[in-house]
Amino acid sequence: MKYELTIERTQPPCGGKPPKTYEVREVTTDDPAQLVRELEDNPDVEMIIDDHDPDSIVIVVDNQPVHHEYIFDKI
C-alpha cells in the first residue's frame, strides 16, 4: 500500500539544532510498524500504534528525551 509518511522528530534543543524537525516522503509498505522498526534501526523498539482512522496510521516512538511520530496517510 502507498502512503505519504510524515516523520516528526522532537528532541531537546542543543548545539543549535532545532527541537522539532519534519520529513515527508512517499513509501510503499504492507507493514508500517516494520518500516518504523527499520527506520529506528531497532527491531525491539516500543511503539504506540493508533490505527482507528481507516485512512491514517500514527506510530509513536517515545525514547526520552527523543520523541518520534510517524504518520502514514494512504495515497
Image (cartoon, rainbow, N blue to C red):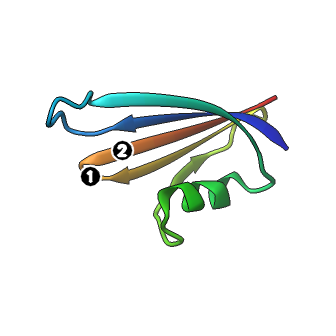
The residue that appears at 37% across and 51% down in the rendered structure is 62
Q: Residues within 10 Å of mark 2 (few under 14, many from 20)?
A: some
Neighbours of disc 1 within 10 Å: few (<14), some (14-19), many (20+): few
Q: Residue at x 78, y 35 (%)?
A: 54
Whole-percent x, y for residue 17 in the image: 23, 31
Provide the residue designation for mark 1: 64
* In this view, 66 is above or below 20: below
Q: Are marks 1 and 2 in contact (CB under 8 Å)?
A: yes
- The residue where tag 2 is placed is 67
Tell me where residue 32 appears, x and y as whole percent: 69, 51
Give how far across and how far down residue 55 sits, in percent.
Answer: 77, 31
Q: Secondary structure at mark 2?
A: strand
Residue at x-position 26% and y-position 30%: 19
Q: Is residue 23 left or right of residue 73?
A: left
- Which amino acid does the dot numbered 1 rest on? Gln
Q: Quadrant of the C terminus?
A: top right
The image shows residue 39, relative to residue 18, as above or below, that is: below
Q: Nearer the viewer, residue 41 or 68?
A: 41
Amino acid carrying mark 2 in the image = His
Quarter-of-image position of residue 56: top right
Which element type, helix, strand or loop, lies under badge 1? loop
The reply, left or right, for residue 66 in relation to residue 52 is left
